Image: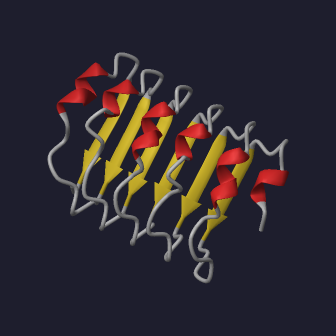
């Protein structure tokens, strides 16, 4: 599917997509996208390299994406991101060194990410952060 043609899309949820493979790169062309939820997307191993182009994104939910590895470096370019959820992503190994650049982040949830290494010092730079949940990591 050529997602980039859906120029007015503001919310996208892909749940329990057991047969979908990787995300197409054109997903980063959704300039109006505010909410992006990927739940139980079992085959997802990574996000597009240019994921940070989603400049309108306010909420990112990566729940139960069990094969999701490292996040792309460009994720720190999501200047409007307020809510980030990473839940039951057992292969996710790290948060980016520059995670503190997400200056609009208000809510950060990290649940049952068993491979997640140490939390980075840059999290203390999240001046707007009001809710921080760390459970089972």
User: Which residue reaches farthest left?
Assistant: 118
x and y percentages locating residue 79 in the rendered image: 52, 26
- The number of numbered discs placed on residues in the rendered structure image is 0
Quarter residue 121 falls in: top left
Quadrant housing the C terminus: bottom left
Residue depicted at 29% across the width and 45% down the height: 95
Residue depicted at 25% across the width and 51% down the height: 94
Q: Nearer the viewer, residue 133 or 12?
A: 12
Residue depicted at 35% across the width and 16% down the height: 127
Residue depicted at 76% across the width and 57% down the height: 3
Compared across the picture, whether 107 is left or right of 118 comes to right
Quarter residue 111 falls in: bottom left
Quarter residue 130 falls in: top left
Q: How is the image coloured?
A: secondary structure
Asked if residue 44 is positioned above or below residue 49 in the image, the reply reads below
Compared across the picture, whether 82 is left or right of 76 comes to right
x and y percentages locating residue 74 in the rendered image: 46, 41
Asked if residue 108 is positioned above or below residue 102 in the image, the reply reads below
User: Which residue reaches farthest top?
Assistant: 127
x and y percentages locating residue 105 in the rendered image: 44, 27
Quadrant housing the N terminus: bottom right
x and y percentages locating residue 31 in the rendered image: 73, 38
């Amino acid at each position: 599917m050529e997602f980039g043609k859906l120029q007015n899309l503001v919310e996208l949820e892909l749940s329990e997509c057991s047969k979908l493979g990787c995300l197409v790169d054109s997903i980063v062309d959704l300039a109006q996208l505010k909410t992006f939820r990927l739940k139980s997307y079992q085959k997802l191993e990574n996000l597009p390299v240019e994921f940070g182009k989603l400049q309108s994104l306010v909420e990112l939910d990566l729940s139960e994406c069990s094969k999701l590895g490292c996040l792309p470096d460009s994720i720190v370019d999501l200047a409007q991101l307020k809510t980030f959820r990473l839940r039951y992503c057992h292969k996710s190994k790290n948060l980016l060194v520059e995670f503190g650049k997400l200056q609009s982040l208000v809510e950060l949830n990290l649940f049952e990410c068993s491979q997640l290494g140490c939390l980075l010092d840059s999290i203390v730079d999240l001046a707007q952060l009001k809710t921080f949940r760390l459970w089972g990591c």
